[in-house]
Image (tube, rainbow, N blue to C red):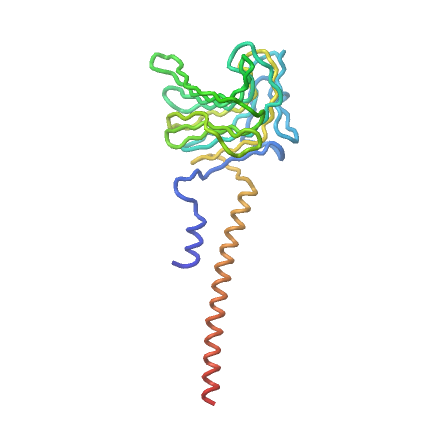
Amino acid sequence: MTNATLVVLLLAPVPGQMRDEFYQDFRRGAIHPALGQFGPDAARVIQQAPDGLRIALRAKRPELGAVGVTPQFQISGDFEITVGYQLLAAETPDSGLGTGVKIWGQIESVDQQAMTLAHLVRPRGDPQILALMARIDEDDQRVVDQRSHEAVERRGQLRISRVGSELLFSVAEGLSDEFVEIHRTTVDTGDVKTLRISANTHDVPVAVSVCLTDLQIRADRLPVTTSRPAQRSALFVLGWLFVLAIVGAGGFFGWRYYSGQGESVAAGKTSGG
């Protein structure tokens, strides 16, 4: 095996890994054109700030729908969706599912499967991380499979991931990068045709304010990718360092070889004179 072949094999992606990545840091730079907005008066309600994308909904507003951002592309195969967030303020609702920040996704399937992971203030005032999977059964009834987890911090990362037909909901609270599993269930392997990240009161007239810090989507296939510059640069530098190490080692041993040959010839001439 040549040195060049060795380099190619080591830098090539490992089969089965999620190779495509979309990354948006809401704390800096322009919003990627592949991210759209949705919800009542979204253009006014959503504001980019130094700490992220702020979404503030007043209790008294003309329409009560959720407001947020939505990728304008489908997600195929295995995936991992991670949203960094901070729940700045949330009034306790009298009814409904709760008030807070929410990830919602529709999976392409015959039973209309939908996934939800949210940090919510529930009607009784309890802050919870709610993981929910819904589908429509044969009798056209909505079937819900859900789990909840007490929320200790008001900021963190929400993550939904799928490998094969297994769907995993997890959360990393505060500034930690250690994710805790909330719920695990089985799902269809169809594309995620709609994904929404929102400030949400579930149609109850209360106020809520959230801040989205970043969004990362990794998948087997994405029609649009924007990898993190730092990560790409690191891989690029490591690759070149590896190449330079091989070239340097080859040059060193080549120098030793030819140097040794030269010394042998010189020694032969000396002994023959």
| Vertical order, 253 against 51 (above or below) | below
Q: Is residue 117 left or right of residue 43?
A: left
The x, y position of residue 12, in whole percent, is: 43, 47
Residue under the point 56% across and 20% down:
100
Which quarter of the picture shows residue 5? bottom left
The x, y position of residue 59, in whole percent, is: 62, 13
The x, y position of residue 142, in whole percent, is: 40, 14
Residue under the point 42% across and 32% down:
76
Specify the farthest residue to the bottom: 273
Specify the farthest residue to the top: 94
| Residue toward you, 230 or 159 | 159
Q: Is residue 163 left or right of residue 28?
A: left
| Vertical order, 267 against 90 (above or below) | below
Residue under the point 49% across and 37% down:
21
Specify the farthest residue to the right: 50
Residue under the point 36% across and 21% down:
110
Which quarter of the picture shows residue 28? top right
Q: Is residue 137 left or right of residue 262?
A: left
Which quarter of the picture shows residue 230? top right
The x, y position of residue 168, in whole percent, is: 43, 28
